[in-house]
């Protein structure tokens, strides 16, 4: 997925947890306005005997409290996640000795009324706990001599004998299924786990805690808490270098993604016959949901002229047999680590000459970028290596109004008309991972063994761009691989997908 490292403006997404203003403590005069409780339909102002409210009927509550066996209440965790999280907490503790730290999981964003989008925990919260699928969880790291004591606060499930068992749509087991209790989570995570209603007391005992994640706004207000940019920066930079467990999660994400590409290519005939881009998008999303947590970001499927749109997530167009199809896809594993891979395929199985020419130039730029991913080199080196190839190729085609040197200069950048995005980024728990790092540690930093990143040059020739000859208008090509920086170079994790046009054509025939 292309990054906007050079033009970034942050926007909210449906998977983001609610945030509190950064480093600005709330005060009593800034109390947030009370929000009405979500509801699915109007509630009566007086008793309606035709539709009695079950939670208000003692006889019904007594009947519902009896006659239940015990469902499966296992705490489901990814193997190794708890041990990795303990290691991650130790790293964070060493980075902030003596500081109280609060990390919140957040909650599912509201889609409408009492209907929410799927919940995904805050990435830092998962990295430090290994706990997924539980809204409103809060990790508290209390400083002690030699490090921190960790306590995880979770909402308790509502079970038989409690009114919430049948009346609480968020926590009642009749609504959400058998749910692990605090003891089950504690055993699975190797953490002290306490009820969420004890969080206020825990926070009251802390001195100037650092906060990150989506803490409930009312709780944040009561304790004068604001999101700490310093803590967010620390966590982003710690997450830049993956440990062995994380690298294995990334391998799994990439392997499942390559399999997903094969599933999509097999459906090209159905898409051409009428299913269109959404048939292909749905094919991948179903595969990702079946073999992982789901897609790691909105899947991009662009046929023909849509391939030139950097983030074509609408996917509402047809798939034409004589056009190329850009697929930018990533499976997010059940541990929330995501791949991010792009290939551009000919829908017919054979590239036209113009498509092949554009693909070949992107391939040369891509290979130059891959060769520059070496430990100790500047992070920006693969960007500049790929961009030089792009600029020279465009100059050979007569598309630059200035010399190659002037185009590549900081004051020029004329070649970027056809490639306005960045061509690589960190990858991990987030598709654009480690985004809160300092510039000096990210784009201005050095590549280090254990980093996972993308290299993704492309050319995007829009159909309405009159600087292009007619045969190039409407062609978009991108090649994106996921790389692990090693001690002596880099491993292309997505190498199972060919890079060259002929290789892609052959690969399509074997799926």
Image: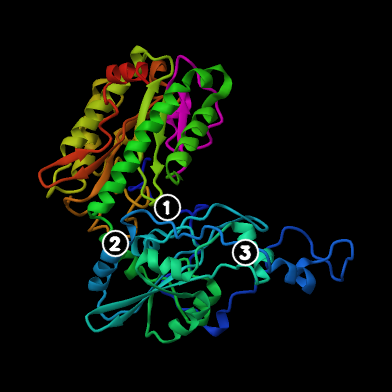
Q: Quadrant of the C terminus?
A: top left
Residue 510, picture quadrant: top left
The question of residue 493 being in magenta is answered with no
Q: Which residue is mark 3?
A: 172
- Residue 391 is situated, as x and y percent measured from the top left of the image, at 24, 30
Q: Residues within 10 Å of mark 1 (few under 14, many from 20)?
A: few
The majority secondary structure of the magenta stretch comes to loop
- Residue 67 is situated, as x and y percent measured from the top left of the image, at 67, 64
Q: Are marks 3 and 2 in contact (CB under 8 Å)?
A: no
Residue 92, picture quadrant: bottom left
**In this view of the protein, which residue sits in the foreground, 91 or 64?**
64
Q: Quadrant of the N terminus?
A: top left
Q: Residues within 10 Å of mark 3 (few under 14, many from 20)?
A: many
Report the side of 348 relative to 40 (left or right).
left
The mark tally for this picture is 3
Q: What kind of element bears circle 3? A: loop
**In this view of the protein, which residue sits in the foreground, 182 or 144?**
182
Camera-nearest label, 1 or 3: 3
Q: Which mark is residue 224?
A: none
Mark 1 and mark 3: Cα distance apart in space:
40 Å
Q: Residue furthest left?
A: 488
The question of residue 322 being in magenta is answered with yes
Classify 222 as above or below 468: below
Q: Which residues are magenta?
A: 297-324
Q: Which residue is mark 1?
A: 9
């Amino acid at each position: 997925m292309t990054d906007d490292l050079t033009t970034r403006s942050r926007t909210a997404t449906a998977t983001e947890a609610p945030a509190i203003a950064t480093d600005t403590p709330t005060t009593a005069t800034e109390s947030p306005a009370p929000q009405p409780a979500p509801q699915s339909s109007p509630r009566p102002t007086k008793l309606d005997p035709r539709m009695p409210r079950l939670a208000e009927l003692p006889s019904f509550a007594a009947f519902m409290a009896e006659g239940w066996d015990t469902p499966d209440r296992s705490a489901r965790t990814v193997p190794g996640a708890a041990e990795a999280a303990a290691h991650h907490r130790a790293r964070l503790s060493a980075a902030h000795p003596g500081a109280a730290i609060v990390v919140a999981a957040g909650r599912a964003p509201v889609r409408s009324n009492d209907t929410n989008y799927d919940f995904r925990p805050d990435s830092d919260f998962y990295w430090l706990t290994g706990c997924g699928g539980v809204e409103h969880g809060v990790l508290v790291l209390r400083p002690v001599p030699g490090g921190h004591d960790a306590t995880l606060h979770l909402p308790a499930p509502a079970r038989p004998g409690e009114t919430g068992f049948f009346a609480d749509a968020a926590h009642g087991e009749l609504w959400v299924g058998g749910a692990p209790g605090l003891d089950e989570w504690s055993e699975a995570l190797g953490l002290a786990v306490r009820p969420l209603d004890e969080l206020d007391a825990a926070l009251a005992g802390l001195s100037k805690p650092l906060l990150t994640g989506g803490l409930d706004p009312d709780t944040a207000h009561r304790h004068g808490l604001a999101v700490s940019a310093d803590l967010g920066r620390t966590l982003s930079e710690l997450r830049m270098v993956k440990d062995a467990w994380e690298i294995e999660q990334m391998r799994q994400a990439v392997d499942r993604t390559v399999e997903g590409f094969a599933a999509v290519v097999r459906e090209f005939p159905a898409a051409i016959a009428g299913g269109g881009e959404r048939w292909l998008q749905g094919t991948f999303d179903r595969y990702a949901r079946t073999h992982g947590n789901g897609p790691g970001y909105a899947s991009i499927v662009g046929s023909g002229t849509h391939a030139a749109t950097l983030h074509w997530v609408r996917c509402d167009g047809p798939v034409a047999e004589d056009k190329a199809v850009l697929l930018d896809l990533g499976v997010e594993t059940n541990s929330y680590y995501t791949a991010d891979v792009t290939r551009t395929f000919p829908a017919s199985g054979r590239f036209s000459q113009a498509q092949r020419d554009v693909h070949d130039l992107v391939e040369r730029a891509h290979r130059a970028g891959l060769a520059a991913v070496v430990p100790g080199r500047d992070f920006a080196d693969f960007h500049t290596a790929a961009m030089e190839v792009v600029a020279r190729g465009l100059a050979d085609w007569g598309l630059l109004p200035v010399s190659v040197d002037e185009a590549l200069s900081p004051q020029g950048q004329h070649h970027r008309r056809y490639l306005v995005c960045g061509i690589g980024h960190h990858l991990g728990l987030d598709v654009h991972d480690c985004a809160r790092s300092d510039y000096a540690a990210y784009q201005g930093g050095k590549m280090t063994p254990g980093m996972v990143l993308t290299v993704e040059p492309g050319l995007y020739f829009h159909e309405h761009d009159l600087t292009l000859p007619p045969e190039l208008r409407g062609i978009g090509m991108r090649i994106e691989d996921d790389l692990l920086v090693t001690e002596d170079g880099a491993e292309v994790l997505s190498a199972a997908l060919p890079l060259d046009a002929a290789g892609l054509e052959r690969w399509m025939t074997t799926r």
